[in-house]
Image (cartoon, helix red, strand yellow):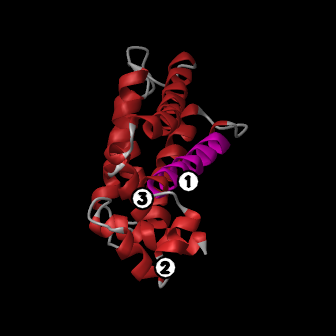
Amino acid sequence: MKERMMDSIIELFGKKGFQGTSIQDIVDANGVTKGTFYYYFKNKEDVLVHIHQSFIDHLLEGQENIMTSEGLSNQEKLYRIVELLIGNIRINGHSALVFFQEMRHLSEEKTAIIMPKRQQFQLNIQKVLEDGIADGEFKKTLRADMLSYAVLGMANWSYFWYEPEGEVEEKSLTDLYMQLIFNGVKEETNDH
């Protein structure tokens, strides 16, 4: 029941926003009583924390699998991380919108729980870039910290506009992003 409720709450938050969704909206959408809502959740913020934690934990797990895969170059790891983010839009589109738009509604205490996980995702991208620089895959002059934010900004903004069912396939969008990134970060060789 809790997971079924979460699915409808995520959809409500995605369409109406956190503030625009009342507890009454939630119970009406689920055909339950307010007592049922309060059995599973303390309040709306509790639901928002659950959405944020589930979303970032899923992404961190996928990212960790990529980063620990044997035999992948740093370029391949970076590609797969961006592919993970783009592919996630199809699976978790409303969760992503809630994740990116509604964090401002979390208390400082709850934000302190979520922020380290968000930062870890960024730091993992930064590490792939730093390793790529150290291994000679990427230009030595890059700032891996700034580039990691640029990669995240490009991929994360896709959650607001990208339609997985539209004319551009996920792989094509990932390829486009990576072409932009890699043409700016690949170490140039003298091979002609």
**Which secondary structure is most common in the magenta stretch?**
helix
Q: Residue at x 37, y 56 (%)?
A: 98
Residue 163 in view: no
Where 20 sits versus 142, above or below? Answer: below
Tell me the kind of residue under disc 1: Ser
Find residue 54 and name its label.
Answer: 1
Q: Nearer the viewer, residue 136 or 116?
A: 116
**Mark 2 secondary-structure assignment:** loop
Q: In this view, does 185 lie to the left or right of 157?
A: right
Whether residues under marks 2 and 3 lie with C-beta atoms below 8 angstroms apart, the answer is no
Residue 70 in view: yes
Q: Which residue is drawn at 40% across and 51% down?
A: 99
Mark 3, residue position: 44
Identify the mark nearer the N-term, 2 or 1.
2
Quarter of image, res 76 = top right
Find residue 76 and name its label.
Answer: none
